[in-house]
Amino acid sequence: MGRAVYTGIYEPGHETADKNGFRQDTLELVRGLDVPIVRYPGGNFVSAYNWEDGIGPRDHRPTRLDLAWRTRETNQMGVNEFADWAKLANTEMMLAMNLGSRGLEDARNFLEYCNHPGGTYWSDLRKSHGYADPHDVRIWCLGNEMDGPWQVGHKTARDYGHLANEVSKAFKYFDQSLETVVCGSSNDKMKTYPDWEATVLEESYDSVDYISLHKYFGNEEKDTLNYFGRAEELDRYIVTIGGVIDYIKAKKRSKKDVKICFDEWNVWYHDRKTDDQRIKEWDWPVAPALLEEVYNFEDALLIASLLNVFIRRSDRVKIACMAQLVNVIAPILTREGGPAWAQTIYYPLQFASKHGRGTALNVSVDVPRYDCDVSQDVPYLDASAVQAEDGKSVAIFLINRHLDSDLGLDLSLEGFGETSVIEHVELSGHKLEDRNSIDAPDTVTPKKGSGIGLEDGKLAGMLKPLSYHMIRISLDASA
């Protein structure tokens, strides 16, 4: 889609490109996010995509029309190139298959090409393309947004659930340890929500491992507090689908738990209407600039709150993929033939990714609250906390959403023994409209935090208005 791949992660001839055409400046920023998995190809694009177009010699690959975005796809990037790039980016592949215009047989062939060692038609074809070892992809998406009438090959919930179940069963016949993701709603405003999830899971519950959810956020009303309240919308969405999962689990008398894969989420509204019109008017360009949202400081504060929701609801949400990675509604921007730089939203994602892994802790807050159009009783202070996997530290993520008032922090750390502050970084002191750009890439960047310290077993101090904080505390291992 757009420049997510071409001139984003892949640009032969760029001064930083390696022998495979991968931009090293982009790779450095991707590595900085420490993302464990990347979904590919994903999106509306996949619902009319022939994966075979992207394998074999590049000069023999066909150029196809992408009906989703009215562009041309040259197929210079395919699954093998993605596997190469994923290794360089220190990430795993999550592959999406086309269940819109295609079906079970093509999906089964895709799996065999990617994961079988050899001795069959498709695995030997992969080997002839220079990839002797299988890619061993562990997580597979069963289509994309199949509830959406805009989708190529849109289906009813019953028809899609049946197809997804058959594909997932076939994949488990190949390897029982593979995990599959069935499509939930494209967003919580769909007329079929949440009946779609219930029907799809009735058909597929016993064979799938995750149900996907998507949601994008915007501030068209230019109402900051209402915008921040959309994090509560996300929370309700997750709770609702968690209830649907529990209902189907009980109805099936099942012992297994299906988890949520929130595999598309981000802020998307700044140029959405303009892009919608451009798509209708252009004449099938190759890799045009599309959906290149330029994020501001306000967006970064919302992203931080959304990440806190995912942490607090991590009993349900086991995967949450920001959409997308580079250029298209993304934390990273590039200039064709020029530099790459981090957007404002890059930093809360980076801190949550690096320090938000482990055990999510319950954090109870008693703070002032407000009401807005999208949510009621929204806390001005948003908080989450994660104990690291080694048990030796806790990362605390805090956002003061108040427009003009400090918030006093008095956080008890009872039961953790001796503690000390390892690190405190913050995003603060910026205008809501401040952005990073090619000429000023460091306008909104983290700085060393201040005003917070340990006092008598408590984390205490003042949080500036409109500020984000990541505070890491070391723990007494014997406590």
Image (cartoon, grey):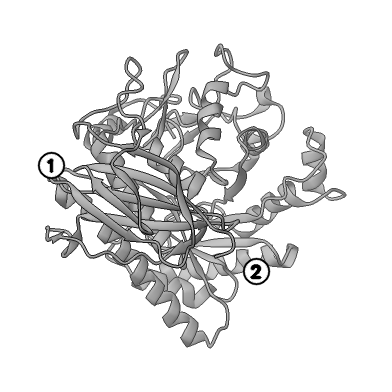
Element type where label 1 sits in the image: loop
- Pick the front one: 326 or 287: 326
> Residue 112 at what x, y percent from top left?
74, 52
Q: Few, some or many C-alpha atoms within 10 Å of disc 1 (few <14, some 14-19, many ≥20)? A: few
Element type where label 2 sits in the image: helix
Q: Residue furthest right?
A: 119
Q: Quadrant of residue 426?
A: top left
Q: Quadrant of residue 333?
A: top left
Q: Residue at x 20, y 55 (%)?
A: 380
Instruction: Residue 169: give its label.
Output: 2
Of the residues tagged 1 and 2, which is closer to the observer?
1
Image height of 208 relative to 44, above or below: below
In screen coordinates, is 257 left or right of 430?
right
Instruction: Please state, as top left, top right, bottom left or bottom right, where the C terminus lies in the image.
Output: bottom right
> Residue 119 at what x, y percent from top left?
87, 49
- Pick the front one: 185 or 472: 472
| Residue type marked 2 | Lys
Image height of 457 relative to 445, above or below: below
- Pick the front one: 317 or 277: 317
In screen coordinates, is 25 left or right of 375?
right
Q: Earlier in the sequence, mark 1 or mark 2?
A: 2
Instruction: Please state, as top left, top right, bottom left or bottom right, where the N terminus lies in the image.
Output: top left
> Residue 9 at what x, y percent from top left?
53, 27
Q: Few, some or many C-alpha atoms within 10 Å of disc 2 (few <14, some 14-19, many ≥20)? A: some
| Residue type marked 1 | Lys
Q: Residue at x 67, y 36 (%)?
A: 87
Instruction: Residue 222: give its label.
Output: 1
In screen coordinates, is 267 left or right of 288?
left
